[in-house]
Amino acid sequence: MDNWYYTEDSNYTAKMEEIFKDDTIFIMTSSFLIFTMQSAHNDKAFKGFGLLESGSASTKDEVNIMVKNIVDVVFGGLSYWLLGFGFSFGDDKRFENSFIGIGRFAYDPDAQDVEAHLEGWNYAAFLFQLSFATTASSIASGAMAERIRLNAHIIFSMVIVLIHAVTAHWVWAPSGFLNRMGVVDVAGCSVVHLVGGVIGFVATVYLRPRRNRFGAHGVHSISSPTNAILGTMMLWWGWLSFNTGSTWGNTGNRWRLASKSAVSTMLSSFAGGISGTFVSYVTTRKCQVMLLIDAVLAGLVSITAISAIARPWESLLIGAIGSALAIISVPIAENLRIDDPVGIIPVHVVAPIWGMIAVGLFAQEDPVIPITKGQYGLIYSGSFKLLGVQAVATLAVVLWSGLLGLIFLMLLHRSPFGLRMTDKEEAMGADWLEHALHGRNVSGYEVEQEVNQRSNVLQGLKSVFDFGWWNRRQPPVVIEPDSPEFELQANGGSLRPGSQLRSISAAALLSLHTPSQSASATGSMLTENTSISCPLSPSRFKLQPA
């Protein structure tokens, strides 16, 4: 990769050093901004994918989702440094082939016998590719929200970056078979978004829907639409670095491509957002938050493969079509009962497939820097050649990612680690199960049901709790959820996860004993139509005189 744009030159000059410095700083800055698309934490503000995903899921899984985004970076990043970069850009001449790179494992540019300027360039190039690899892992992570165990996720995140790395060799390495065919993917539409999206799609189908997601009483819990919107806006400006950084510098006329890429990225997102808003108002007479988010992101993904060479009107058209296709796929996935918590299917499966095909329609060669290897899209050349190459590349990436993703999911499912949380564990929430943390909005978990007779209430409570003044010799009862729905029946009423017992006699005190929480509730006498529910996690309950 040290000769993507530069070669070793014995006539190295001060001017060349300035060029290296400028381009290195450009892609390093782009790398830093791309990392904000994944996960970061500063007081109470989460960034990028983590913020979008945590805002789109249940409150009892927010922390776990953020942890998984950090895991994607640290464990996935280590995996990429050890093996992934070598699989993508290894250049050992003894093993050169069109399928996978060999060499540059545990990458250390200092160990290479190159000029100092190339050494620095190699470090920067590795960092940029690292940001792409961990982004693919973060995309897949969102599809598995609220169901996969953390230890299984750690292993899977390390695998995902390697799956990505092989496809990157196909598309971007000089010896890759798709590269030799003439595939065009400027900024990772296929090797980042489609890889992450297909793996996420396979994972969400394999893991099965979340409990109570579908059916007559199915719900789709969104903990914080505000967080989801803020995460989308952070992804938006991170995307500018994603696409402009893929021009690999701002010298040698590449600044033209970078500026063009920025404008095409914005225009495509405009068209996507407008499409989403229009469809939302037509179908619901309201601007639906998640529909708008999916539409904007689908527009951004759609332009990724062609961002550096798309003309303004093409960018608008590509974004609008990509957004429309993404929106159409949402009800289809719902009807097929595919549980897609954060819109992986419309944004990172449908949109990148269209984005790759769009290259075969609209591509034009840049007059200065060869981006398409002299090829033109169907509209400008009348030839189906590039369209066919793009279709083959898309199919190859889909099959590779889907097959490898499924194989490793099956292996993890049969491993001692396990893969999916049980229904009871899912009801408790990953924040409690994996991190011993209670959700910040416990009352938001409650599902209440009316209790019609005071006598039934008292009998039900007596059967569940130890009423000290009735039988002080009995120890407090440990309540264990005994059904997948995590319900405790109380003789005519229902005790459900989430809230405290309410409207209890002023002469009594309810104490909740958990490893990290105590709470109490007092109120008036129990009457008809009193709502009763129990906390999220198994706890000891004891009703005592005040």
Image (cartoon, grey):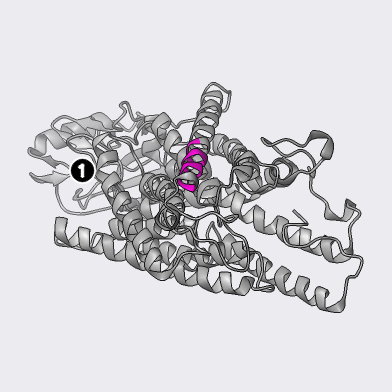
For this rendering, which residue is in front, 241 or 319?
A: 319
Q: Residue at x 74, y 53 (%)?
A: 1
Region of the chain picked out in magenta, as a range? 386-395
Residue 517 vs residue 289: left or right?
right
Residue 475 in sight:
no
Where does residue 66 sit, x and y in percent of width and height? 50, 52
Q: Is residue 256 magenta?
A: no
Crowd band around label 1 with a 10 angstrom C-alpha radius: few (<14), some (14–19), many (20+):
many
Q: Residue at x 37, y 64 (%)?
A: 229
Residue 308 in sight:
yes
Residue at the extreme front: 382
Q: Residue at x 69, y 58 (%)?
A: 127
Which residue position holds label 1? 532
Using the rendered view, name the quadrant where residue 447 is placed.
top left
Using the rendered view, name the quadrant where residue 232 is placed.
bottom left
Where does residue 49 sit, x and y in percent of width and height? 48, 56
For this rendering, which residue is in front, 384 or 353?
A: 384
